[in-house]
Image (cartoon, helix red, strand yellow):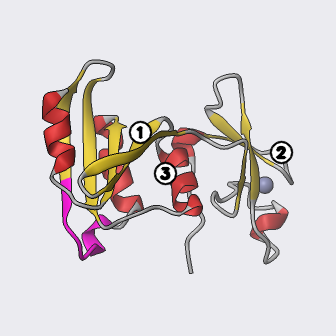
Amino acid sequence: MKTKQLMVAAIENGTVIDHIPAEKLFSVVNLLHLDRMKTAVTIGYNLPSQELGTKSIIKMADKFFNDEELNQLAVICPNLTLCIIRDYEIVEKRTVALPDELRGIVKCTNPKCITNNEPMRTHFHAHGPERAALKCHYCNTVIALDDVKLVKKP
Ligand SMILES: [Zn+2]
């Protein structure tokens, strides 16, 4: 616990993403385009974790997420912990869970789906008892979260 606090305290303002399963780390790195960030980024890979065995952590100075980015994160990696840091203190800590509905975030895998043929936003619902899948609102295609492709940003 003390170690974690020291690591977090190293940034003045920004966001720490905690509890990233090690195998998801590089998906999250790609999603967030960390290679293009101009501010300090610290990535911890395969750190010991009581709950997960190992986990990974990303610290980003002067980075704060909007709702769309949070939804993308939740799709790639549900149940992350996000810590918002201001003046070296954690001012907010929350779990990023998959929302009930996602609009314009995920691509439908059905080539005949209207969202792949008309200029419109996709719309998915969380699906299944463990919410491990998404269901297209328009064509009912079910996509496992592990297979999800995000809508490319313009
Ligand atoms: Zn569809």
| Quarter that holds the N terminus | top left
Residue 48 visible to an observer of this rendering: yes
Q: Residue at x 30, y 51 (%)?
A: 26
- Residue 118 is left or right of residue 56, and the answer is right
Residue 46 visible to an observer of this rendering: no
Region of the chain picked out in magenta, as a range: 34-42
Badge 3 amino acid: Leu
The residue positioned farthest toward the bottom in the image shown: 154
In the picture, residue 103 is in which quadrant? bottom right
In primary-sequence order, the first of circles 3 and 2 is 3
9, 110: nearer the viewer: 9
In primary-sequence order, the first of circles 1 and 2 is 1
Q: Which residue is mark 3?
A: 73
Q: Estimate how packed mark 2 is, as few (under 14), some (14 to 19) or many (20 or more) residues with alpha carbons within 10 Å.
A: some
Q: CA distance from mark 1 to mark 3?
A: 11 Å
Badge 1 amino acid: Thr
48, 63: nearer the viewer: 63
Residue 17 image offset from top left, x and y in percent: 35, 46
Q: Residue at x 19, y 37 (%)?
A: 5
**Quarter of the displayed picture in which ligand 1 can be seen:** bottom right
Residue 45 image offset from top left, x and y in percent: 19, 41
Q: Give the structural element (helix, strand or loop) at label 1.
A: strand
Q: Estimate how packed mark 1 is, as few (under 14), some (14 to 19) or many (20 or more) residues with alpha carbons within 10 Å.
A: some
> Is residue 39 within the magenta segment?
yes
Q: For disc 2, does the CB lie below 8 Å from ligand 1?
A: yes
Q: Residue at x 69, y 64 (%)?
A: 104
Q: Which residue is mark 1?
A: 81
Q: Which residue is mark 2?
A: 140
Q: Residue at x 77, y 45 (%)?
A: 141
Rendered view: 65 above or below 139: below
